[in-house]
Amino acid sequence: MDILWFVIFTVLLIGYFALEGANIGLGMLLPALGRTQEGRDRIVAAMAPFVLAGEVWLVAVAGALFGVYPQAEGEVLFGLYPLVVCLLVSWIVRDAGLWFRRRTDGPAWRAGWDRMICLGSWGLALSWGAALTALATGLSIVPAALAGAAALAALLAFHGRAFGSWLLPGGAAGATTGTATGVPPGAVPGGTTTRSLPGPAVATGAGRGAAAPAVSAVLAAAPAAVLLAGAAPWLLEHTAPADTLNVLSLMILPCAPVMAGAQVWVWRTFGPRSAADRFPSFF
Amino acid sequence: MDVLDLARTQFAVTGSLHFLFVVLTLGLAPLVAVMQTLWTFGGKPVHERMTRFWGQIYLINYALGIVTGLVMEFQFGLNWSGLSHYAGDVFGAPLAIETLAAFFLESTFLGLWIFGWHRMPRRLHLACIWVVTLTAYASAFWIMAANAFLQNPAGAVERGGRLVVEDFGAVPTNPMLAMALPHVIGAALLTGGFVIMGASAYQLFRRTAEQEFFTTSLRLGVAVASIGTVLAVGFGYAQFGPVGELQPGKFDTPLAGVGLGFMIMIGHLLQLVVLFVLLPVIRWLPRWRWAHPIVMLMTPLPFLAAILGWLAREAGRQPWLVYGRLTVADAMSPGLTPAMITMSLAAFTGVLGLLAVVDYLLIARLVRRGPAAATLGAAPLPPPERTPALTL
């Protein structure tokens, strides 16, 4: 049972970096990829349906940490105190930007919240990078954390870029040639417009369609996966007693198929072929 | 203030903020679901417009519910690691069930509902808001179960200096939960009803073009607030039984006693007004312009009562975090420094306080502008014509 819950915990953390990592990365690149307000609107509208389904993986990670590893929860979160505060404030600022940007008219309002989305996304990436480094080096916040922060930020930005070119094959500028002419998304080298999203798929000449964001998702989740592999013995030592795990299994496992099904539904409904441009976005 | 006071202040401020938004979420979610059900099966345009307008108010409010909730979830580990260390084997389970089985589904289906207008079959889209509503109430159940455990640690025994599960069945059947949950649900419906009443009264008072819309809405608000006040007051008094037995003297401290006293006063006032004044005249109320400012002025009262009730429940447990087992002082993270708690208190209360103000202004703005300004579920643009793409 403790192995099963370790696997669930790992899946949740990897799922967070693979899925929400894409939204964070795209948020980081928002001003770079969407140079006009129209371009930023298209990027945010394309990623918006994935945000609620993505960030909830971290809520689940924290809940599982409390339920499955109560003896580790306080130690980990308290040990990373300033980083956890930074991470939460960044998360709040990013979410506020998404929820508020279209709530009043006026270019300054929306541009201002777009800056908050970018700032919050950078804060999330950097504090996660520093936190993972600190965890790997035994909860000491060392100078290496700076390098770790930069490395994870680069990985998430790369992932966000791949996700963006998969979602918006015609680029942020609005050229919809990719879907309109039936060319597979991701195979279009961004047309010839300068504001397109060439993306890693094109840059490396590998992959079509969903292959590029899938590869970048693996890269984005790799640091957390490596860390968990290393921390496995320590975490397993801190597992809650069997009685607690039985309760969790009984209450949560029956919901797992619905949870997975709803996530798949999100990705099928709002993927690149959903002609999102026709639908006024709430974010 | 010392470190402990600051940590308690942080929990009280962020918890109160969270509750202000959550209580309205719980009140509005079922109403929006009912409106959309009427629209889906009845097809009246006014029900579609009501779903979109009140749905958008529900969503603007929801945004702050999420971000304040994030701080609540992580705050245990930051400032109160002694709690998970001592009671996490039992207390962690309802929290984990809430996040994994309830909130995970709520958030995913909420995303499908917000962005799924016109992009999925109408009945599936309707099912999404019902799943969101049911999981929101499931969340309330498990969070209240976790809180009831702190009030009365049933189902757990101390072994090796820590609480372990003895009978988990006692956690969801805790007597400190049984009457408190319907009380909170009643308070939520009362709040949701009053927000709808207050906003409708404003629009009717200003004699805008939306008379039919807000006449229907005002009557719905009165009906829902009536149900809410019966539940809230009835189950409020019903709690005195288990509280007197399990936490004698709970309301003897000034803060808990005064909080409780004012909450009961507001509860009775609202019940009197809703059941004996507004409900009997529900047919004419939309046309009685002189009554509308009074309804508008009463709208903040359910929020105030909710905060006071929460304050009484939590302050009355002091000095215990887990009643009779673990004190708040012992639960504080060992090694928490004044610098750490000052920084996090300033960051969380500053950012969340500011966003809460912005959020309420945005809600007020939408109320002022009326249903025409709701962008949620706006009609899609016509599909592009199949002309050859521009050659680049």
Image (spheres, rainbow, N blue to C red):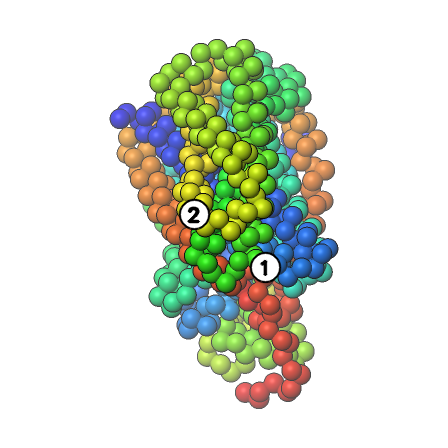
Instruction: Name the image quarter holding residue B345.
Output: top left
x%, y% of residue A169?
Answer: 58, 72
> For the residue carrying disc 2, how many other residues have a C-alpha within 10 Å: few (<14), some (14-19), or many (20+)?
few
Q: Is residue B319 above or below residue A267?
A: above
Residue at left offset 59%, top offset 59%: B49
Question: Element type at marker 1?
Answer: helix
Q: Nearer the viewer, mark 1 or mark 2?
A: 2
Q: Earlier in the sequence, mark 1 or mark 2?
A: 1
Q: Which residue is mark 2?
A: B290
Image vertical order of residue A156 relative to residue A194, above or below: above
What residue sits right under mark 1 in the picture? B49
Image-based side of B116 in relation to A100, left or right:
right
Look at the image and tell me in which quarter the C terminus of chain B lies. bottom right
In the rendered image, residue B340, in percent from the top left (x then y), is placed at 32, 34
Residue A157 spot, x, y in % from top left: 47, 60
B139 sits to left or right of B315 = right
The image quadrant where one finds the N terminus of chain B is top left
Q: CA distance from mark 1 to mark 2?
A: 27 Å
